Image (cartoon, rainbow, N blue to C red):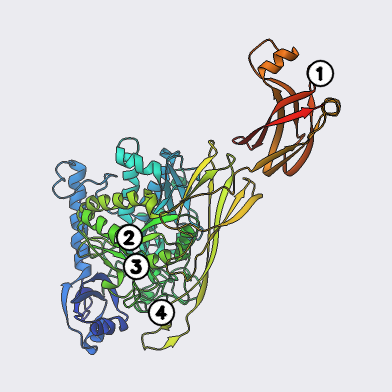
Amino acid sequence: VTQAVAPAPQARGAVPERVVRVATPDRAARRRLAALGLDPAERADAASTDVVLHDQADGAALARAGLSWTVQIADLRERAAVNRATDLRNAARAARSPRAAGGALRAVPSGRSTYRHLADIEHELKLLAQQHPGLVKLVTLAQRSLLGRPILGVEIARDVNVDAGQPVFLQLGTHHAREWPAAEHPMEWAHDLVNGYGRDPQITQLVDATRNIIVPVVNPDGFNLSREWPVDLGTAVAGIDLPAQLNGLLPIDDPAYTAALLGDQGIAPAPGTGFAYKRRNCRVADGRNPAPGECESLANRRRGVDPNRNYGGFWGGPGSGFGVEDDTYRGPAPFSEPEVQNVRELVSAHQVTTLITNHTFGNLILRPPGVAGSQATPDEALLRTLGDAMAAKNGYTSQFGFELYDTSGTTEDWSYSVTGGLGFTFEIGPDEFHPPYAVVAAEYARNREAYLVALQSTADSARHAVLEGRASAGTVLRAHKEVDSTTARPVLDFAGNTAAARSYRDVLDTTMTVGASGRFAWHLNPSTRPGAAAPESWTVTCERPAGAVLARGSVVVARGERKDLDLCALDFSVAVDRRRVSRALQRGLRTRARCTLRCTAKVDLSVDSETARRLGLTRGDRRVVVARGSAGRSFQGSELFSVRFTKAARSKLRGARRVRLRVTATGLSGTTDRRTIRRSLTLTR
């Protein structure tokens, strides 16, 4: 079976969608371009900025603004057809002989030779979790997409089902629908970690020391529409769960779902590329979910919220669209979109010490801040060092986000500002949103090395904070913080009008569970946010697995600091009353034990071997216990009980003038947190 792919004819008089390079030699020109609300192509330098022109009106807007440009891709539809034909040839060659395809297609860890569909991604994530249950865990993010799709990811760690307090490396994939390589690289990274664990010493060591969270597609509605256009059935199937065949990881035989998610029928009809180069999500109108068929209607092609302008950091500032048809439309409020809420909740529930959000294109590694004129971050030296180290591996340019162009409401600006975790954007590839797959594979070979640098940095405790100490096995440690932030000051529209900044609250709440040894080392972000006016603290609680709080305290900890946390350790003390020998033998010794955590307590009194032999209690060379006592139940706080002498001791000690005893008191919380106190006690007649 052969397939010929050719572009559909253009409508008479239509202008093809194209990528152009606009001359922006100074700040004023870049501001004029941003004010037009055109579709940015994620590539810029000091002299120029690439944008997508979707129709004649976009070109006319550039001309009216006095901006000149040169064409980089004359017809996106035609380029997409050529790329698809190239992928088909390479895939066929690889199927016949992988070696024969080697010159055109560099191998990736999964062995793929073509772009994945959304169903491929979902299926592979489930398969990885099913085949590697102790290493890989499937996660479903809290919010469904606007069209009702679940958003899936995986966690990869040693003993992945145990929250052991490792530092977290978060890899995010496609925010912008047309950026298919941004989903491919996180998927290949997941395969790389799984394939290498136990085989590759570097990967094994790093996976043992970290937790990796990978979400290949943040915006599944937009991605699926771009990837499958013009076949996507949209809401005809989006509101239902995955078919049982997919949930069971068996071949899919649901024809509707297959057509919607697996269909790949070529290029959009004229005019233009339809949704193949869609950027945003499926929000057709603010405040409501789209009705069936709305998102995939060509009448709404210019609708949607840009997910990577919807985060709280600098939201509403330069570099984000104000109008609903602007290609960088920021949405009506920060975090208005469920896809963005998912990332917010994911970051807020984990100690993400390193974050990479993948995009295309430009061969760039971007770090905060994203808005020119902002102060350099307090961690600029560290961010630049890590960015440069990653760029040394993949050959990209390491720079500030605003050096591409102003961007506000982006992932890493928000995540860094609220958590202090180091965040970056990767702009994958030199010149296309979704180039031939051979380019994606070649780029992954370089980005793999950059990702390993990021993972090594994640494991480096000098780049985050650590709380260490002891607690009962199974104790849940919780770090909680609520912080109020503001959006851009002021919020701007393209006409230069301003509005008051908006406030929003982030709730950071993360947990770990103490292991069987009773010792823990919890890797987390600094307690004080970057640029905070005064030191801030984590509220740390020690809890039973069922949720009962055992202890609570405030902890201030800085980047690079290792701090002992004794809040969760058992504090145990004991006091034994002194009595005359005769009274002690008759009534015992009243004892009071105190435990900061629920514990059991016991006390033994013993005499040395010489005294024991002299009194006739033993013929051996060991100490002899002459009295015992314990609390009758577990308790927290103070408990009173009696330590009573044995029958033999009462008989032998009755005539003693003076008895020197050793007190051995033991408090035990749970099964591992044990405290033992030893002291001497002398009783006289």
| Number of other residues with Cα within 10 Å of mark 1, as a class: few under 14, some 14 to 19, many 20 or more | few
| Marks 1 & 2, CB-CB < 8 Å contact | no
Image side of residue 654 versus residue 166, left or right: right
Task: Residue 647: give its label.
Answer: 1
Image side of residue 579 versus residue 260, left or right: right
Quadrant position of residue 283: bottom left
**Marks 4 and 1, how far apart in space?**
89 Å
Instruction: Give amino acid for label 3.
Output: Pro
> Where does residue 602 sit, x and y in percent of width and height?
71, 32
> Where does residue 443 sit, x and y in percent of width and height?
22, 54
Q: Which circle's residue, 3 or 2, is located before the other in the chain? A: 3
| Marks 3 & 2, CB-CB < 8 Å contact | no
| Marks 4 & 1, CB-CB < 8 Å contact | no
Instruction: Give amino acid for label 2.
Output: Leu
Which residue position holds label 3?
368
Residue 320 visible? The answer is yes
Which residue position holds label 2?
382
Q: Helix or strand or loop: what does disc 2 sit on?
A: helix
Q: Helix or strand or loop: what does disc 1 sit on?
A: helix
Residue 670, placed above or below residue 233: above
Q: Between residue 664 and residue 455, name the one nearer to us.
A: 664
Front: mark 4 or 2:
2
Which residue position holds label 4?
324
> Where does residue 336 sit, x and y in percent of width and height?
48, 71
